[in-house]
Amino acid sequence: MSVTLVLGGARSGKSGYAERLADASGKEIVYVATSRAGDAEMAARIAHHRERRPAGWRTVEEELALAAVLRTECAPGRLVLVDCLTLWLSNLMFCDGREWPDVGEVTLPERFHSEHAALLDLLEGGVEGDLVFVSNEVGMGIVPWGAVSRCFADEAGRLNQTVAARADRAVFVAAGLPLVLKGSTC
Amino acid sequence: MSVTLVLGGARSGKSGYAERLADASGKEIVYVATSRAGDAEMAARIAHHRERRPAGWRTVEEELALAAVLRTECAPGRLVLVDCLTLWLSNLMFCDGREWPDVGEVTLPERFHSEHAALLDLLEGGVEGDLVFVSNEVGMGIVPWGAVSRCFADEAGRLNQTVAARADRAVFVAAGLPLVLKGSTC
Amino acid sequence: MSVTLVLGGARSGKSGYAERLADASGKEIVYVATSRAGDAEMAARIAHHRERRPAGWRTVEEELALAAVLRTECAPGRLVLVDCLTLWLSNLMFCDGREWPDVGEVTLPERFHSEHAALLDLLEGGVEGDLVFVSNEVGMGIVPWGAVSRCFADEAGRLNQTVAARADRAVFVAAGLPLVLKGSTC
């Protein structure tokens, strides 16, 4: 198994970079979309991503049970592209419809922890084929107001570190161009 | 023509880096300022930038018609430094005095599109001399609240990708120091 | 003296990276903590950092008089790790309990300026042993609303540039992995 993390800001070109990487692999591609079309704006963003993808790619939509999908889909000769970890994280934070406090301590949903543990298990155990994760860098602005935003920034950063530590390659994308954090140039 | 993109966060030292690059070129320098002194704070920021520039540089102020200025000013043996693309983008977004909604879809001013098309035409066609663009990375924090902020982050990221794809060199500046995204060290 | 700047976003792994760097030096380590446990959330963050530190390290807590502490603590054969410059900056901005305006010009406390000057003096003069600064990148998101946030982003960026210019090595950390801005790989 080869695991790659493609990390970048909003509209950094990280998805496009990961898609070109997938395309250049010459392998069968499974695209795992973690977004949900909760409103018109998000639906437009999803449509924008979908139009760009080659027709031959198979798309699997999964908001929460990422590790389960990867266990099913990862296979020799295949590249699974997950876009993106940050939306998956956001889905998990809000999956039980809880109200978030503006201040004070935050308790994450049980499913948040179980799904994280499942992903970590998967990465530790190793899977067949290639796996590419797209993820957002969200911690390089002013620390945001509101406990939920800070919690999200913390968890997103922690997840990026966790995946990067287990990845064979990691790149930081800015303006559509990669800086290699780990491994060789993709 | 040689085109360079200098990308960085707020107070990353990107302007200073671009200015040293221009200074080291030994060429005649035209400095294109895209900011407008809308309030006292912005006026102070502009004055701060102006004081640092060598006396021999010629300054052209243009908030909107960037491509037209570049068509006039770019010439063999000359380096044109544009500081910065992000303010130009912001000027275009707000150029017709519209009210922006907090949620929902955003429609950009017609001039936004026509000026973008003109800049793209220019870069595709090629101009004489050297051209250095300074631009902000704004997408690495928490996705901001408000449709206008998200639209701005999207458009700024898209513009950075567009220019970087057509640039000969691109650098990402942090703490005043460059990471090379494309081309050789400046 | 060897000075290193470790720069990164929130939860980028910058502290962990700096701590591994310190640990690998084989030197006596003095850890200078600049945070103050103002509320429960910050107390939890401090505890999180403290648990990770090796038992043999000596901790000095100092919110404001950083240069004075460094003059005392820096010594041959010793590595002093400062975590972090950004909290120190924040402490200085708010050290006199002033009210900050939402708009308009901002005047910084006198102590802000005197402590900055003292740190600059120290770095210019040189000290014995090794010195590692951890600092936040906060300028790569949307420019925040509110004069105090913009002032903070400006000063944080300026401080990073100032320290980086005088450092022997500087790294930019993302997802726990370093990109070398200056000097050799740490």
Image (spheres, coloured by chain):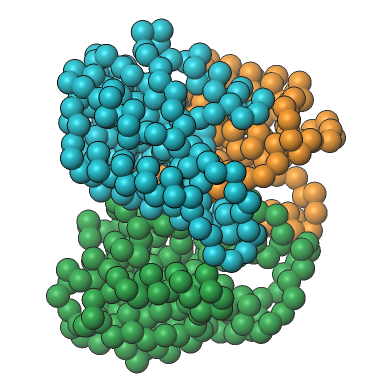
Chain colours: A cyan, B orange, C green
Q: Answer above or below: position of A102 versus B158.
A: below
User: In this orientation, does residue A35 appear?
Assistant: yes
Percent position (x, y) of residue A128?
Answer: 18, 27
What is the quadrant of the C terminus of chain A in the image? top left
**Residue closest to the eye, A34 or B124:** A34
Percent position (x, y) of residue B98?
Answer: 84, 33
Q: Answer above or below: position of B158 versus C65.
A: above
Q: Residue furthest top?
A: A55
Q: Residue at x 51, y 58 (%)?
A: A107
What is the quadrant of the N terminus of chain A in the image? top left
Q: Answer above or below: position of A1 versus C178.
A: above
Quadrant in which residue B182 is drawn: top left
Percent position (x, y) of residue A124?
Answer: 20, 43
User: In this orientation, does residue B23 appear?
Assistant: no
Percent position (x, y) of residue B40?
Answer: 79, 58
Quadrant in which residue A146 is drawn: bottom right
Count of number-bearing discs: 0
C168 left or right, relative to B11 = left
Q: Residue at x 60, y 23 (%)?
A: A43
Q: Answer above or below: position of B78 versus C67.
A: above
**Residue closest to the eye, C132 or A28:** A28
Q: Residue at x 40, y 82 (%)?
A: C122
Quadrant in which residue A173 is drawn: top left
Q: Residue at x 29, y 70 (%)?
A: C52
Q: Residue furthest bottom?
A: C72
